[in-house]
Image: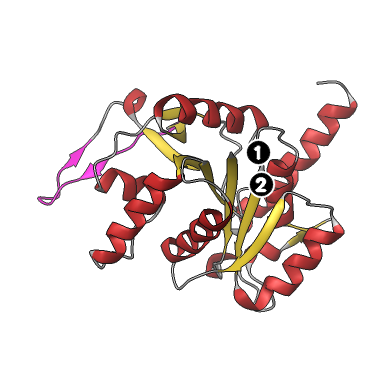
Amino acid sequence: MNIAVIFAGGQGHRLYNHSRPKQFFEYRGKSIVVYTIEVFQHIQEVDAIVVVCLEDWIPYLRSQVEKYGLTKVIDVVPGGQKGQDSIYNGLQCVKQHFPEDSLVLIHDGVRPLAMEKTIIECIEVAKEKGNSIVCVPSTETIVIKKNDGSLEEPERDSVLMVRAPQCFVLKNVLKAHQKALADGLHDFVDTFSMMKHYGYELNTILGTAENIKITTPADFFMFKSIIEAREEGAVFGL
């Protein structure tokens, strides 16, 4: 089984207008997180979806799930204090419904532009190798500032930016989360970092640059432009 765990439990203060968190910003009457869920809803290889949501917004999100016919969503569960905690809540829900050898695709609720072919490749690689992390190549020069103030410039061809989804076997990622809890570690920026910390050999695939995380107002404007461009491309057969 392949289950998407979409976490939308953050407040998103860099794109927060005091009335709603960024995942519930709307474009054409539809919230960002619904756009994200729809990506996985329409992929045949995805069997089910669990959404992790700010607790106060769960009734609203459930109404949106019903409104847009998102039939693969089996549950909407409350988030935790941090992103790591929210993901763990979602994984615990998956564990209640599916076997431990299922694959889980962990994805940001504010990353609505992932491509179907990328997600399918992510699943295929994880089935073969045990996990798969979507990345994109760096398009700019990267420097690393050392403790002595000097700068090191890695080869650009060797630099990848980690994105999502990140796909793991359920039992493995749950084991890593439980180790983190036992070790008192709550600040991993994403699941990739946690799995790397606990010694898992990770596999990468290349995704598309447009698979952005909507964090700032500029990201939101880019999202709208890409949606419009995709629609125009469909009309003109591009």
Measuring from the top left, give residue 160's x and y in whole percent: 39, 33
Task: Give the residues drawn in magenta, as a range.
Answer: 139-152
The amino acid type found where label 2 is placed reads Ala
Quarter of the picture containing the N terminus is: top right
Say the numbered circle drawn on residue 46.
Answer: 1
**Label number found at residue 97:** none
Seen in the picture, residue 102 relative to 61 is either above or below; the reply is above
Q: Position of residue 27 (x, y in %)?
A: 79, 56
Residue name at image x 68 percent, y 74 percent: 57
Can I make out residue 29 in this image? no
State the residue lying farthest toward the top. Answer: 237
Task: Name which residue type carries label 1.
Answer: Val
Judging depth in this view, the residue of 155 and 150 nearest the camera is 155
Position of 2 with respect to 149 (left or right) is right
Residue at image mark 2: 48
Of residues 6 and 208, the one nearer the viewer is 6
The x, y position of residue 214, in whole percent, is 60, 53
Q: Secondary structure at mark 1?
A: loop
